[in-house]
Image (tube, rainbow, N blue to C red):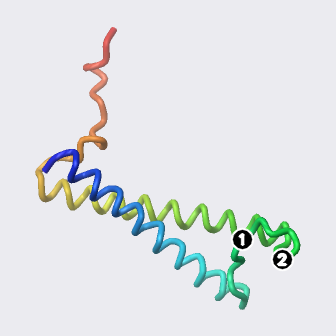
Amino acid sequence: MGSLVWRVMGAGAAVLGAAVGQRLVGAGWRAATGEAPPDNPNHLDEVSWREAVAFSALTGLVVNAARVIATRKAAQYYTQSAGHLPPPMVKDDPQDAPG
């Protein structure tokens, strides 16, 4: 497996993770507030500041966490299949640094 395979897998995992995260946020928002999540938190006449900030913070937290989880799972699968970490996830060896 090469770098191109990882790019496809990593991007796909990130997109899938973000989509799952968005659905989780929507479901959680409905469960917590009893209302549909805001379509656009920036609409001043439809969404209060408090609601906009809470929704944005929740979305950022959940979506990014879901992306990290999905990407790490994809890397784990890649590692099991290829026998090594995906190239972008290999930490540079400090001994290889110039100087």
Left or right, 99 with reference to 37 = left
Residue at 31% over, 12% down: 98
Q: Amino acid at mark 1?
A: Asn
What x and y, as percent, mark residue 18? 47, 66
Q: Mark 2: few, some, or many residues within 10 Å (few <14, many ≥20)? A: few
First in sequence: mark 1 vs mark 2: 1
List the residue tagged with mark 1: 40
What x and y, as percent, mark residue 20? 46, 74
Left or right, 27 with reference to 33 = left
Q: CA distance from mark 1 to mark 2?
A: 9 Å
Left or right, 48 with reference to 61 = right
What x and y, as percent, mark residue 51? 79, 72
Residue at 12% over, 58% down: 81
List the residue tagged with mark 2: 46
Compared to 90, does 51 lie above or below?
below
Residue at 66% over, 81% down: 29
Nearest to the observer: residue 94 or residue 74: 74
Q: Residue furthest right?
A: 45
Residue at 64% over, 68% down: 58
Q: Mark 1: few, some, or many residues within 10 Å (few <14, many ≥20)? A: few
What x and y, as percent, mark residue 50? 83, 68
Q: Amino acid at mark 2?
A: Glu
Compared to 23, does 72 lie above or below?
above
Left or right, 56 with reference to 25 = right
Q: Are marks 1 and 2 in contact (CB under 8 Å)?
A: yes
